[in-house]
Amino acid sequence: MLAHKHTGKLRPHRHTSYAGLVFILVLAGVLLVGMSFAAEAAPPAVNPQSGSVGLSGTVRGPAPSTAASILTPANGSSTSSIPITVSGTCPAGTFVSIKKNGVFAGAVSCQDDGTYNLLVDLFDGANSLVATVTDALGQNGPDSAAISVFYNAPSLALPGGTQGKQLFLQTDTTVLGGDPGQSLARTVTIVGGVGPYAVSWDWGDDATSLSSQAADGAVTASHIYDRPGSYRVIVRVTDSQGNSAYLQFVTVINGPVTGLGASKTGGLGSLSGSLVAAWPLFVLAVLMVGFFWLGERRELGKLRRRHLVGG
């Protein structure tokens, strides 16, 4: 408070321009609202596409040094039904692929608790199973100790006394990567069995598809994933004699996944986070100005009631 130099009356501090402060706060509020709408309307950040420029990079680290293990089935066991479940331990954050007699039999992501399990077909007779771990850069770690499993296949006798060939599946791509909204094609090769074949795909995101194939050979199917993540894909083929074959592999969709720690991004993505921190400061500034103004009005009222302010 200051006393007027002529009348001696008390008045609010002459350097406090509440009209100017209110104008500045209103202008700041309008800017914050506009920037908030712009951040909300911006499309989510995606991984850089071909021809674009990004500020992130991948530094190649050492290949996995710990091997996976095969705990089930037991070494030296035998079975008369397929597929079997292969499970064991693995370094977290890797992929585990299984080979049977040197042929790819399936792949799966290692779980957070350091374990894995997947369905695997077997060849008729003796099968040597080996697990291999691979990191996200495609670097292989050491192989597990091999275990032996014997499969007693049922008779594949066909009408007319001919002997059919065992049905199984092959693929060259164990782990496939892509982006949300991108159509990804998977190809498997049908070997053996008797056509026509029914081909069923479980894409790992609650979506399935079914097709038919007249003869053995390559089969291709495509799918689009909406969200980032690691998906377990299972394809099952059944021939005209009721024999089935399975193959399991992994599809990885790029992008930040909830709970896994998203990478830092620029542009409107970081602007949105800044606005979240700015709004409380803006509200605090409004409250402070309001309290100062109310405080001065209150003091002036007290002084007038005590006849210390004239007029």
Image (tube, rainbow, N blue to C red):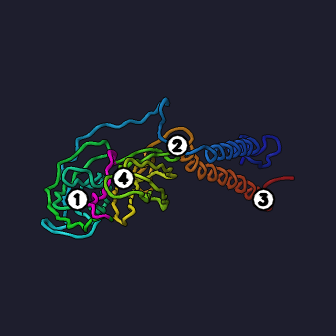
Instruction: Residue 293 in the image: state x and y as whole percent.
Output: 72, 52
Which residue is located at x 50 percent, y 50 percent?
Answer: 224
CA–CA distance between discs 1 and 4? 22 Å
Kindly report the distance in space between the C-alpha atoms of the residues bearing marks 4 and 3. 75 Å
Residue labelled with disc 2 = 45
- For marks 4 and 3 on the same chain, the one whose residue lies earlier in the sequence: 4
Q: Is residue 113 visible?
A: no
Instruction: Determine whether 6 is above or below 79 in the image.
Output: above
Where residue 69 appears, as percent x and y from the top left, is 18, 59
Looking at the rendered structure, the secondary structure element under dot 4 is strand
Reading the image, the residue beneath label 3 is 301
For numbered disc 1, what is the local secondary structure? loop
Range covered by the magenta-colored residues: 160-174
Q: Residue at x 22, y 43 (%)?
A: 63
Q: Which residue type does callout 2 highlight?
A: Ala
Label 4 vs label 3, nearer the camera: 4
Real-space Cα separation, disc 3 to disc 1, in angstroms: 96 Å
Report the amino acid beneath label 3.
Answer: Gly
> From where the camera sits, is residue 220 visible?
yes
Between marks 3 and 2 in the image, the one whose residue lies nearer the viewer = 2
What amino acid is found at the position of numbered circle 1 in the picture? Answer: Phe
Q: Position of residue 196 (x, y in %)?
A: 42, 57
Q: Which mark is residue 171?
A: none
What is the C-alpha distance between the residues marked 4 and 2?
24 Å
